[in-house]
Amino acid sequence: MIAVLAIGISIISIGFFTNQQVEEMVTTITPYENLENYKEELEKINQYNQQLLTDLENQIINSDDVHIEQLKKEIQVLKRVIDDNKKELDQVIERLSEMKEQ
């Protein structure tokens, strides 16, 4: 029983100290690094959306289905999302370059 208690306290202590180190690391992220991380996430989203668009376009090409109109609407929405994402990504890149120059 004492051994189990000692091991439990050890694990809790290690978790507590590890958690403090993680919090310290999070607070040391600069705004530039935060924006850089955001840019990388936007790029991943954009790549995913581009793949979805390609897949939808291929479905239309290879389909004799009656749902082609719905697929076309989904493509239009996806194209708007991609365009908006690209605009936001351009703004983030611009802010990053301005921050880097300072």
Image (cartoon, grey):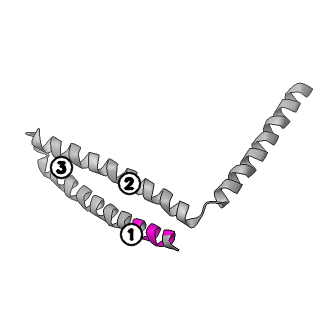
Q: Main secondary structure of the magenta part?
A: helix
Q: Position of residue 72 (x, y in %)?
A: 15, 53
Residue at image coords 25%, 62%: 80
Compare marks 3 and 2 and give the one earlier in the sequence.
2
Q: Nearer the viewer, residue 40 or 53?
A: 40
- Residue extent of the magenta highlight: 93-100
Q: Position of residue 70 (x, y in %)?
A: 17, 51
**Alpha carbons under labels 3 and 2: distance apart:** 24 Å
Within 10 Å of disc 1 (Cα), the crowding (few <14, some 14-19, many 20+) is: few
Residue at image coords 7%, 39%: 64
Tally the marks: 3
Mark 3 vs mark 2: give the one in front: 2
In the image, 89: left or right of 32?
Answer: left
Most extreme residue toward the right is 2
Q: Position of residue 52 (x, y in %)?
A: 27, 46
Mark 3 vs mark 1: give the one in front: 1
Q: Per the image, is 98 magenta?
A: yes
Q: Considering the numbered disc 1 on the image, is that residue within a helix, a strand or a loop?
A: helix
The image quadrant where one finds the N terminus is top right
Residue at image coords 22%, 53%: 74
What amino acid type is highlighted by mark number 1?
Answer: Gln
Residue at image coords 12%, 47%: 68
Within 10 Å of disc 2 (Cα), the crowding (few <14, some 14-19, many 20+) is: some
In the image, 12: left or right of 40?
Answer: right
Q: Tell me, for residue 27, which label it has, or none.
A: none
**Tag 3 residue:** 71
**Alpha carbons under labels 1 and 2: distance apart:** 13 Å
**Tag 1 residue:** 91
Q: Per the image, is 89 magenta?
A: no
**Tag 2 residue:** 43
Q: Considering the numbered disc 2 on the image, is that residue within a helix, a strand or a loop?
A: helix
